Amino acid sequence: MSGKNGLDGVYSRIDRDNKKHIARIRRLLRQPSSSQQDIGIDECADLVADLYREVGCDKVEVVETKGNPIVYGECKGSSDKTLLGYFMYDTMPFNEPGWESPPMEARIVDMKLPAGKVKAIVNRGADNTKGPLAAFLNSVDACVKEDGRPPVNLILIAEGEEELGSPNLPSYVKKDKKRLSKADACYFPYFGQDSDGASNLYLGVKGVVYFEMECSGKSWGRGPEEFGVHSSQKAWLDSPVWRLVDALKTMCDENGNVILIDGFSDEIAPPSEEDKELIATLAESFDPAAFKEDMKVSKFSIPEDDKAALIRKYVYGTTLNIDGIWGGYMEKGSKTVLPHKVTCKIDIRLVPDQKKAAMMPLVRKHLDEHGYEDIKITEIDTGYDACRASVKEPAVQSILRSFKAFGLDPAIWPTSGGAVPFYVFKDYLDLPFTMSAIGHSSLAHSPNEYMVVEGNKKIAGLPEIEKFFVHFMDGFAKGA
Amino acid sequence: MSGKNGLDGVYSRIDRDNKKHIARIRRLLRQPSSSQQDIGIDECADLVADLYREVGCDKVEVVETKGNPIVYGECKGSSDKTLLGYFMYDTMPFNEPGWESPPMEARIVDMKLPAGKVKAIVNRGADNTKGPLAAFLNSVDACVKEDGRPPVNLILIAEGEEELGSPNLPSYVKKDKKRLSKADACYFPYFGQDSDGASNLYLGVKGVVYFEMECSGKSWGRGPEEFGVHSSQKAWLDSPVWRLVDALKTMCDENGNVILIDGFSDEIAPPSEEDKELIATLAESFDPAAFKEDMKVSKFSIPEDDKAALIRKYVYGTTLNIDGIWGGYMEKGSKTVLPHKVTCKIDIRLVPDQKKAAMMPLVRKHLDEHGYEDIKITEIDTGYDACRASVKEPAVQSILRSFKAFGLDPAIWPTSGGAVPFYVFKDYLDLPFTMSAIGHSSLAHSPNEYMVVEGNKKIAGLPEIEKFFVHFMDGFAKGA
């Protein structure tokens, strides 16, 4: 590291400032920023800009888009390498039942994990991904405070629409191409340790398409059209709810595990040689127990004894998931009504080389061919294709070296099941990308989402996480 | 009529007191009494008791049960005949969207019906059945004010749990058998005119069973068990929502019109000779247009040109209706979640000789045999069997004569599609029963439920309705 104190100085600073750093994370987490419900977005963008300034960015801009603002920051580094930090300050809604600590109080709770006792902050966004954002900013803060500068030039962009499919990120990146293309690689910080301490590095992300499907008497021209009617009328009137059941059943079989839409999976690329090697290695180390413990599940959808098959299912699995369904009377008691409409939300996860643009037409064609021309499908938010990096990518190799420096040998997954809009940086800026870090967080999109801040021998606490970020920046700067 | 002024005096009194009578109806309607949600029940029971007293009942009791109270009243009549008036003071919930006038303001609105212009009170319960209850009490009031007594002895019982399946009515009737069995017949007032003015008399009611079906990862031992998880996990985890779709699809086919549960329809009795004659007559007069106009529907589930077939579908149609379904994310936007449970509400309508007691075991057996042992079914409220009366029944003949006296020749239906617990009076008291009256109301269980108070040449207004009640009591007293 080129700073006057080397890594040790920054590391000590991180240890000394731990309380302040935890406070910064909690401050960001406590600011609601649910993009789905448009709660707290502008306030959160302003707060992120404040934090950029606070940790020493030279230039900070809250860039307006057609949707939620993007918070842009620059921080001059002590090398000629430039890293584009991609973040999101928006989160999922947090009004589901089941929160044991309030979702916006960022309480620090004791937790017993398979890896042992830890302390964790519980809050929406702790895992996905305001926790990692704030922790990364803490590491920049420590570098600037100790050395005046971080080891690399940083361009930071935090968007507020990731949970909406990043609809305005592409046009922003196109417009700001000149500044952004100074970067050598794109980095998305995300905690990569499981609850048992094992670590993971994901080389890519899946694509996503999200839509609503509505079956109504009005479009159908049968059954109740304007309002739900007394259910005695079911004797001679049709039911849009039963019709949706029929339609859904033509789309999937076997508890939703077999997708029946023509052409849906045709384009899926066969595993590459690199993937085959990675999966063979993964199969040796992958322990399903920690995953099941984290998710509180008993079983996978296929037997777990063939671990390579299980991993392939995760990596190559395209999905048609029902995120929600609702219609008719949904409260206490026995209101008897024949509903006039019913709606469900569905998300598709895409793997290479499925094309996002092909999916909605395929669903439409399927419904039409099965006689469901009347069922409305409406794409919600913006979908995109899957995106992958090779393990040989220099930025990926830097991350791997940092994992090893902290005593971890991460399992390398060809892809995560989640979706991140890396395609924007790959397609428009031709930037390689990488993600992950040490640290453990979990329960994205679920109640009791958390990130560990006080770890143990197996799981990194906040200071180690922040040191990891510094180590990664330093290593990336040195190309070593 | 035995009263000093004869029917003309009471009729004039009804005309003179119309404003007061409308006010009484609005007063009762404006008192919320949603038994499903336990809103306003006790207040409404007290109000009904007050109204009993106000119209001249000699004895009034609010009888406690294990659930909501039953309001008992006696009014000595001027003959030795006794009529048991059965009423309900509870209603369906009224929080569904779509109300053009507020559901608890009892506004009087202008309405254009196929029969022409009318004025109607819009309020939850106007049709089902606080409107008919208050109108009946108005007719008693007029008799008492004019003659000192109604033409028959009246025993009035208004229950507050009809919309819950009348769970405590049977034990009440058993307990109070001595007083109640003084009655010669049971009468349930209900407005029998369609929106075009045609009138209907229903000789019976269907039975009903209501249950919830819940599919959860927890019971299944697959998929998310404790909470919804990030939908990326669908790649290797199972979905309880898709499982419910599969399970429902084994229960019904063809948009819910073909029930596939073994034994479900086996016990249905063939049409009786009386039914066949009634249906043949109905087929000549039944005009589907008014029904479709009232319900704002375009089509029946079978072609309407064969009117006898259509009527048989209504009369003999047993149903498995999905009243509501819900699970996962049901709000704005695109939250990606693999839900851990999904629930639906289903009601079964029973025709003779299907047995209520057989239905839940049949559903359970069906699910078990199809591998859905894990899907929970919970009966909600109390179901009961269908109940029928013959057109030859003296009480029915009295009602028919009153219809004719008011210029109407009602279409006689073997049964309504709705459920009323007449079985209690038939099984425990061996009482014949009848229902219906002139007048028009509609949209039970729907927004904008209404009853006409100012009619026209085709549809009875409130004074005519109340005169009808007096005529019926008088005719029943005379046995003519």
Image: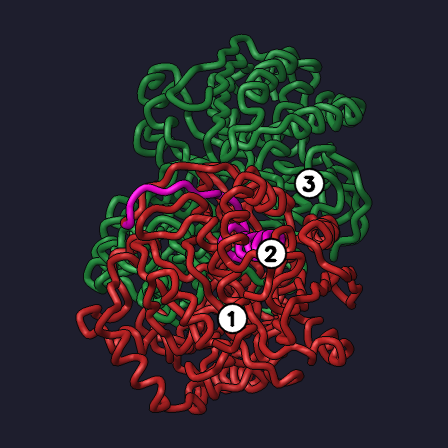
Chain colours: A red, B green
Q: Is residue A126 above or below residue B89?
A: below
Which residue is painted at 64% across and 11% down in the image?
Answer: B148
Q: Is residue A138 magenta?
A: yes
Q: Which residue is mark 3?
A: B451
Q: Do the residues bearing badges 3 and 2 touch, measured as CB atoms within 8 Å?
A: no
- State left or right for residue B345 relative to residue A477: left
State the separation of the CA atoms marked 3 and 1.
55 Å
Viewer-nearest residue: A52 or B403: A52
Which region of the structure is painted magenta?
A: A115-143
- State left or right for residue A154 relative to residue A135: right
State the separation of the CA atoms marked 2 and 1.
31 Å
The three-letter amino acid code for the residue at tag 1 is Ala
- The image quadrant of residue B94 is top right
Of circles 2 and 1, the one toward us is 2
Q: Is residue B71 visible?
A: yes
Which residue is painted at 58% across and 66% down in the image?
Answer: A2
Viewer-nearest residue: A202 or B438: A202
Chain letter for the residue marked with disc 3 in the picture: B
- State left or right for residue B226 relative to residue A129: left
Q: Mark 2 falls on what kind of element? A: helix
Image x and y of residue A411, in percent: 33, 70
Q: Which residue is mark 2?
A: A143
Q: Is residue A401 magenta?
A: no
State the separation of the CA atoms marked 3 and 2.
76 Å
Labels 2 and 1 in the same subunit: yes
Q: Is residue A233 visible?
A: no
Q: Is residue B148 above or below residue A92?
A: above
Q: Which residue is mark 1?
A: A419
Q: Mark 1 falls on what kind of element? A: loop
Q: Is residue B411 above or below residue B396?
A: below
